[in-house]
Amino acid sequence: MKKLLAVIITWTIFMAPAMAQELERIGEWGTPPYHHIEQTGTALYAVSENGWIDVFDVTEAASPVRGDRVRLAGKPYALLFHNERAYVSSGWAGIQMLDVSDPLHPVLTGQVDLDSDVRDLSAVGNTLFIASRDNGLGIADLSDPDHPSLIEYVSEFTIDDTVTELLTDTIVTLIDGTTLFVSDGTYGLVVLDITDPRAPTYVNYSTTGYIVLELLVEDDLLIAGLGIGGVYLFDITDLTNIVGLDNFVSESVDLDGDGSNDYTYQVNYTYGIQKHGDALYIADGVGFEVLDISDTTDIGILHEQLNEFPPRMP
């Protein structure tokens, strides 16, 4: 018995690693959880922190069709479209670049290591803003779109003469390119003036009740992904007085019209959001939902896409 045990141990130590090196991936099964969504035209990019991006054709908003998959290094958190490029924040793998001149068929073109935990990205002109979980808000030069060059990190801001550390998970830029919203890593949102993008200045601070994981701005509407807090819509007409409009976490539906609820559509955990017309796509870790926000004070649900296909909702 001792001899047999010795043989097994010897085989495990010397032979198993060699066999492991010879293993070859021959396929995959199932649909990954998505943690971030971005859209360009009719191409929707669903980012999985497991290390890839799935591209969906969303010509028909309620019937997405999955196409290409791009595999990435590190842990991809978010994606930014800018000038026929897609920049992917990839944690400690830095930033990865994709050529998206053909949006439905992206091509990986390069990677920049910033020696930092990169969570999100935003850009104005040739300035790239980097949300670093350990270094704060990074500012980089994008004059060469394939080789972002770091200028500096801003790791703190001042509110009422109090210096507060800035730990960023999410950033987003207003459409006019003069205001930057920054999640402070707790339950707040910092508003910065980036009229001079290389020298941002403080404007306002607003609490959200939950950690902000994703933000989207369109005109005077701010859409916040709040993890277990679901999705919240805010009116930002006055940046010094941000007003809540409506919140969506779940909705029960009577499918057969018998007066009782047959199914509850649940935003499991809001990781990513993307707006297309009046449709709002939510990446929630087990699939994604499509919400109707035509009435910003009364959010409804259009579609639920779970790990299994086809979708549950007719």
Image: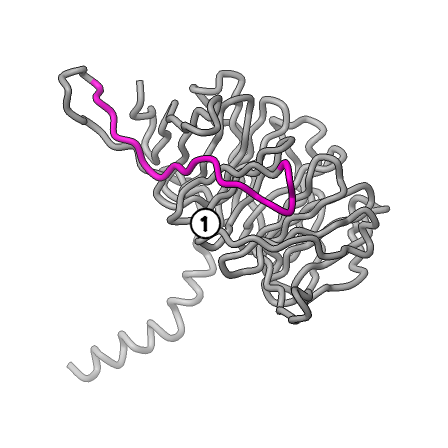
Residue 260 is left or right of residue 173, and the answer is left
Closer-to-camera residue (92/238):
238
Task: Say which quadrant the N terminus sits in.
Answer: bottom left
**Does residue 222 show up magenta in the picture?**
no
Three-letter code, disc 1: Glu
Label 1: how many Cα within 10 Å (few below 14, some 14–19, many 20+) = few
Question: Residue 185, how many percent across, how many down?
Answer: 54, 60
Task: Say which quadrant the C terminus sits in.
Answer: top left
Q: Residue at left 65%, top 71%?
A: 162
* Residue, disc 1: 24
Question: Residue 140, how many percent across, how many down?
Answer: 78, 55
Q: Residue at left 46%, top 40%?
A: 232
Question: Residue 139, how many percent across, how many down?
Answer: 76, 56
Closer-to-camera residue (193/35):
193
Report which quarter residue 26 is drawn in.
top left
Above or below, 34 against 19 in this view is: above
Report which quarter residue 27 is drawn in.
top left
**Does residue 254 show up magenta in the picture?**
yes
- Which residues, given as a range, are shown in magenta? 237-255
Residue 159 is left or right of residue 51, and the answer is right
Above or below, 71 against 310 in this view is: below
Closer-to-camera residue (168/11):
168
Closer-to-camera residue (140/296):
296
Q: Residue at left 51%, top 50%?
A: 213
Above or below, 158 against 288 in this view is: below
| Residue 98 in view of the camera | no
| Residue 33 in view of the camera | yes
So how many labels did they put on this image?
A: 1
Q: Residue at left 37%, top 30%?
A: 305
Question: Residue 268, how many percent across, how many down?
Answer: 34, 43
